[in-house]
Amino acid sequence: MQRNDDAPNTFSGRPSLLGLRPDDLYAHLADIGVSARLDQCRRALAHLLSDGESDLYATRKPLAKSFVADVLAHTEAQRLEVVERVTDPADGFVKYLLRSPDGALTEAVRIPLHKEGRFTVCLSSQVGCAMQCVFCATGRLGLTRNLKAWEMVSAFLTVRDEAPGRVTGAVFMGQGEPLHNYDEVIRAAEVLSHPCGGRIRAESISISTVGLLPAIRRFTEEGHRFRLIVSLTSALAERRAELLPVAGRFPLEEVAQTLRDHAASRPGLLTVAWVLMAGVNTDQAEIDALRELLGDLPLRLNLIDVNDARADGFRPPSDAERARFLSGLQVLGVPIVRRYSGGKARHAACGMLASRALQEDASAG
Ligand code: SF4
């Protein structure tokens, strides 16, 4: 497993505008002796990250061209290179393959929402992943490196600018474990939700995790408005440790307490994801254990069929097996949504990537 956190920051080595909030740009310009005001930094970012249609800050009071030139001379505005776009005609998902300055490839997916003309973007947070989930192709790659915030924002802006309608949400559910790259993912989410950045409502940004408890606790303490999706996938300790080897190291009682604290810290339902695997985690023992473990929490349960391309890999349950599990779960009395893992026809679905869960999560946000 190779780890390279010293990957080039941008194409030029200068800080990327795409990973900066107005305060950061202000501090950077001050550091290098360029005189600027905070409101100029706000308007410069709003202008440079704009989709061209809602450039509120810039149009209210036009920026001096010399200031924009100064900003561009001391920062980087270039985006990741688009290597490939693949559209799945069956469901309208569009998968983007993007190249970073060091050659690393990353993926993003444009997902149509139920509300016509609206989209959300599924973003990767790492190149590869260290979590080793046994049903996931990315997990078998190992971790190459963390993505920088600007790379995630760049992926988002590229997808947004090419969308034939409004992009109203983002979800960190692509390659990688977002909370394993905590600082950069939170920074990216802050830029995406900033009025001078991506202008997405914070509540419409979801961050998925296999359940890294120290990071969930930090997320809870910091009080972010972004939404968490926690993949449980088994409520039986031994089975969970086999399926999710890294996350499975945390005792389930500790997982439950951490989720309880998180749920208590904010209104609304806590989303728990469950990757369905035929003959593996759809039995009555799971239902009983889940009820025992999280039965007192305000949950929403997302069921997602496994998507394993290997000939001898995990398979989604049959309709009968799935219906039996669903019916048994009714005892929990919580909303249960069966999700669709989109883009399969063109291999635009990777592990947990691009689940149609996002369609409703984003709509609900
Ligand atoms: S399912 Fe997610 S966390 Fe697990 S290995 Fe795959 S990308 Fe990583």
Image: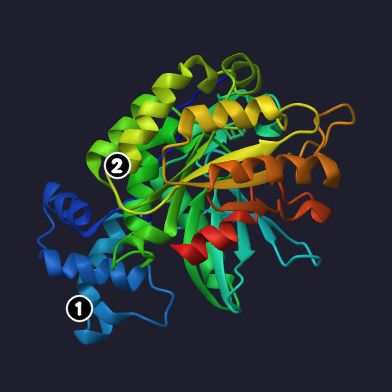
Badge number at residue 64:
1
Pointer 2 residue Cβ closer than 8 Å to ligand 1:
no
Where does the C terminus fall, quadrant-wise?
bottom left
Q: Is residue 213 visible?
A: yes
Q: Which mark lies nearer to you, 2 or 1? A: 2
Q: Position of residue 135 (x, y in %)?
A: 71, 29
Above or below residue 51? Residue 305 is above
Pointer 1 residue Cβ closer than 8 Å to ligand 1:
no
- Judged from the image, the secondary structure of the residue bearing numbered disc 1 is loop
| Residue at 52 percent of width and 58 percent of height | 361
| Residue at 64 percent of width and 18 percent of height | 239
The answer to whether residue 38 is left or right of residue 270 is: left
Q: Position of residue 306 (x, y in %)?
A: 73, 39
The quarter holding residue 133 reads top right
| Residue at 80 percent of width and 67 percent of height | 89
Quadrant observed for ligand 1 in the rendered image:
top right
Within 10 Å of disc 1 (Cα), the crowding (few <14, some 14-19, many 20+) is few
Disc 2 residue type (three-letter) = Ala
In the image, 260 versus 188, the foreground residue is: 260
Badge number at residue 350:
none
Q: Is residue 157 visible?
A: no
Disc 1 residue type (three-letter) = Ala
In the image, 79 versus 68, the foreground residue is: 79
Within 10 Å of disc 2 (Cα), the crowding (few <14, some 14-19, many 20+) is some
In the image, 193 versus 264, the foreground residue is: 264
Q: Position of residue 293 (x, y in %)?
A: 48, 28
Which residue is most to the right? Answer: 311
Above or below residue 69? Residue 314 is above
- Judged from the image, the secondary structure of the residue bearing numbered disc 2 is helix
Q: Position of residue 142 (x, y in %)?
A: 61, 24
Residue under label 2: 264
